[in-house]
Image (cartoon, rainbow, N blue to C red):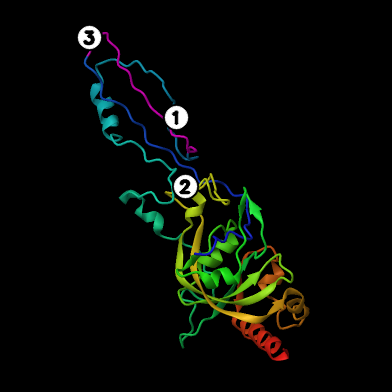
Amino acid sequence: MAPKRRATRQSVVEDELKHTNGETQPKPKRTKRNGTQDTRTEQANGDQDDDENTDLKANTHVKAPLKKPSRTSKRAGKSTQPPESTIASPDSKKSPSSASSSTPPAITTTAASSTNRDANGSQQTFWLLKAEPLPRYENGKNVSFSIDDLAACTTPEPWSGVRNFQARNNMLSMRRGDLGFFYHSNAKPSGIVGVLRVVEEAKVDETAFDPEDPYFDKKSDREAPKWWCVGVEFVKKFDEVVSLARIKEEAGKGGKLETLQLIKNARLSVCKVEREEWQFLTEIAEKEKKAE
């Protein structure tokens, strides 16, 4: 399989998800009338929820009279199971309690509709996904990925490593069978080089939890994942690149590509392409081929 693509990663600053682990206390021991009992709470390394009113203190000894054992026992009974760790390797098995984490978050779709299909079943919104074909290193690892690398893949390639919420939301809006342009970024020249197809809808981006991955996100929480990716496959490669310079020629005021997201938000690694824009760019690619 071709090297993993982790290109054009984008980072944003967002309030991190916060979680509070449950409080665990052992059952009180029988002691003499004036005896004492120890209760201990242990706080996990995660952040504490802003709405949580309970203060967790590590290794704190609380003296309590024996005459209130029933209250202490009741509290302990609610937290008899240890809290689950929020740090896990990509291949670790998820517990039943974390099954909901496989459900993508609800967002307002960036596509024309939730199904991205019109009454005739035709795709309404198309896509453009960027990758870098030339060698570039993140944390000592080469993150380059070209359309030829995608063509060599024998299984769906996860478009992972995206760390921008607008780009992520575009992927969450993709539907199986959607077509998109493959765009070579930071290349000579940069531009559209071919077409890919979405074959797997949004799933959790496991690279966010992998400390060895160039795009590991230490703030990611497996119980509430925020980074998602789609699986794609190769469709075709254009004979000639539809260069960024050529695209900009049509992106001026009144031009056919005036509202193209690729131009309006140049730093976005996963862009949407309207149907009319898709058709026009495809025509340019065909003309470039005939010109040869």
- Residue identifier under label 1: 55
Crowd band around label 2 with a 10 angstrom C-alpha radius: few (<14), some (14–19), many (20+):
many
Viewer-nearest residue: 286 or 202:
286
Identify the amino acid type marked 1.
Asp
SS at badge 3: loop
Q: Quadrant of residue 146?
A: bottom right
27, above or below 19, in the image: above
Tell me whether the residue at label 3 lies in contact with that at label 2, contact meaning CB atoms closer than 8 angstroms: no
Identify the amino acid type marked 2.
Asp
Q: Say which mark, if any, is on residue 32.
A: 3
Viewer-nearest residue: 177 or 112:
177
**Residue at image coords 49%, 85%:** 122
- Residue identifier under label 2: 221
User: At which x and y percent is residue 254?
Assistant: 76, 82
171, above or below 125, in the image: above
| Tag count | 3
User: Which numbered mark, 2 or 1, is in the foreground of this view?
Assistant: 2
Q: Earlier in the sequence, mark 2 or mark 1?
A: 1
Crowd band around label 3 with a 10 angstrom C-alpha radius: few (<14), some (14–19), many (20+):
few
User: At which x and y percent is residue 288?
Assistant: 70, 86
SS at badge 1: loop
Identify the magenta region. Answer: 31-48
**Residue at image coords 35%, 54%:** 99
- Main SS, magenta residues: loop
Distance from disc 2 to disc 1, alpha carbons, whole Å, reads 22 Å
**Residue at image coords 49%, 48%:** 210
User: At which x and y percent is residue 73?
Assistant: 25, 27
Q: Earlier in the sequence, mark 3 or mark 2?
A: 3
Distance from disc 3 to disc 1, alpha carbons, whole Å, reads 29 Å
Q: Is 235 displayed left or right of 66 in the figure?
A: right
SS at badge 2: loop
Q: Earlier in the sequence, mark 3 or mark 1?
A: 3
